[in-house]
């Protein structure tokens, strides 16, 4: 197997859906596992990129970007009901969900249309409409940079939490995920509990939806609420929904009884940051070309020529307004790469 393709001084703007201008010293495309051996041991700082839909470049990257393009999907029957789906990390997540629905395999319908690659899905334990990757993830195969060997991590070893995992926290940068194994079912048990999803299904008289009807309802909601990165660059939700101890959350709910919230483990509540931001008048707000999406206050967008400085001003302005009004620290959700220019 030959060495992977490499470009020097590569343009990153088109490799991140937020499209801030940035360059990388080296861009290496990985499309076969054996190519890992050809990477020099004394590697410059390496950052892995899949679809770039949750990575925002605030500055040039002085090292190497490894563009993950590993492909392949394999199905294994486990018993009459369950099937293991092993998908290489460079497969497109949405295409994988469609493939599973087409093959009568269920559990991922609510996660349809989430942009990006399969390999990035465990990084923040992708989730939508009441379902998270952790509900169907069996294991993750990864290259361990520290031990320089392939390892397998079971679901419970991945530290998957709301928009978080060991890959994003304690072991950030240690693993290159090469494939993901999911355990899916031939029996369809729709998860329709998420309020806006239930309402949409009811409007279309799909109280007991078929798999494709459920997936179609999720796509309708997403297309209505979220900007298409191909038309308006963005990285999805820019902030995590805050998770607070129940007591602190209840105090806020007394002041704002209409604030949407969801129970979380360990007597915590998750609050809808989009609602908090809309109430502060942030929908449509902008600093230069960095703005808040007009239809969803949790989504920041690049109106065309946004600069890092404008985006950082916007983030800072939103975070301090939320701290002043509600006493809450809003945490950015995407990976923010590079320190801001001095
Ligand atoms: P990238 O941006 O390429 O990478 C994200 C992070 O993962 C980076 O830190 C990167 O270094 C790391 N990484 C990527 N691949 C690997 C790998 N193989 N091994 C190790 N590390 C890796 N997310 C949700 O959870 N739910 C949603 O509903 C949702 N909706 C979205 C809607 C829009 C319009 C957009 C733009 C984004 C949305 N997202 C959502 C965020 C994003 O789609 C997910 O986080 C997705 O998993 C990112 O995939 P990616 O390949 O584009 O990741
Ligand atoms: N809301 C408002 N105003 C707004 C935005 C939202 O009042 O401007 C309200 C909604 O009406 C709803 C509640 O807030 O009652 C929640 O909104 P929504 O259903 O859009 O979900 P969210 O909490 O804003 C999260 C995820 C999304 C995921 C959706 C659906 C996070 C950070 N975001 O958004 O994921 O698609 O739920 O499950 O958890 C992403 O991570 O990039 C992402 C898009």
Image (cartoon, rainbow, N blue to C red):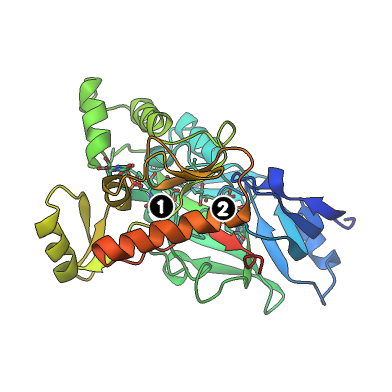
Image height check: is 83 above or below 249? above
In the image, farthest residue toward the top: 204
Say which residue label 2 marks: 310
Residue 44 percent coordinates (x, y): 79, 72
Residue 136 is labelled as: 1
Label 1 residue SS: loop
Q: Nearer the viewer, mark 2 or mark 1?
A: 2
Residue 164 percent coordinates (x, y): 44, 64
In the rendered image, which quarter is residue 135 located in?
bottom left
Which residue sits at x=36%, y=45%? 282
Q: Quadrant of the C terminus?
A: bottom right
Residue 256 as seen in the image, left or right of residue 223: left
User: Between residues 248 and 130, which one lies in front from this camera angle?
Assistant: 248
User: Between residues 239 and 246, which one lies in front from this camera angle?
Assistant: 239
Which residue sits at x=60%, y=46%? 306
Residue 16 percent coordinates (x, y): 64, 47
Say whether disc 2 or disc 1 marks the residue closer to the N-terminus: 1
Mark 2 residue crowding within 10 angstroms, few (<14) / some (14–19) / many (20+): some
Q: Are marks 2 and 1 in contact (CB under 8 Å)?
A: no
Which residue sits at x=34%, y=57%? 241
Q: CA distance from mark 2 to mark 1?
A: 39 Å
């Amino acid at each position: 197997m030959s060495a992977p393709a490499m470009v020097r001084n590569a343009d990153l703007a088109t490799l991140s859906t937020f499209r801030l201008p940035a360059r990388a010293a080296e861009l290496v495309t990985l499309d076969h596992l054996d190519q890992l051996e050809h990477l020099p041991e004394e590697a410059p700082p390496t950052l892995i990129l899949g679809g770039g839909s949750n990575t925002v470049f605030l500055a040039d990257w002085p090292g190497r970007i490894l563009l993950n393009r590993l492909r392949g999907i394999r199905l294994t029957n486990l018993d009459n009901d369950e099937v293991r789906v092993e998908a290489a990390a460079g497969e497109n997540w949405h295409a994988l969900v469609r493939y599973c629905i087409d093959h009568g395999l269920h559990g991922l319908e609510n996660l349809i249309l989430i942009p990006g690659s399969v390999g990035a899905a465990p990084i923040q334990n992708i989730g939508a409409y009441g379902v998270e990757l952790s509900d169907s993830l069996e294991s993750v195969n990864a290259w361990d940079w520290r031990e320089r060997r392939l390892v397998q991590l079971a679901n419970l070893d991945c530290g998957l939490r709301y928009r978080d995992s060991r890959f994003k926290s304690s072991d950030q940068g240690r693993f290159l995920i090469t494939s993901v194994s999911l355990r899916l079912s031939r029996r369809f048990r729709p998860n329709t509990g998420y309020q806006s999803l239930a309402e949409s299904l009811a409007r279309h008289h799909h109280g007991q939806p078929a798999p494709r009807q459920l997936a179609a309802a999720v796509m309708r909601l997403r297309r209505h609420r979220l900007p298409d990165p191909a038309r308006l660059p963005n990285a999805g939700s820019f902030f995590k929904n805050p998770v607070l101890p129940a007591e602190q959350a209840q105090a806020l709910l007394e002041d704002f009884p209409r604030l949407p919230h969801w129970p979380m483990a360990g007597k915590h509540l998750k609050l809808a940051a989009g609602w908090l931001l809309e109430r502060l008048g942030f929908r449509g707000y902008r600093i230069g070309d960095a703005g808040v999406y007009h239809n969803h206050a949790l989504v920041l967008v690049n109106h065309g020529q946004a600069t890092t400085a404008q985006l950082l001003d916007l983030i800072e302005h939103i975070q301090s307004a939320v701290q002043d009004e509600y006493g809450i620290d809003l945490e950015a959700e995407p990976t923010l790469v590079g320190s801001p220019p001095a």
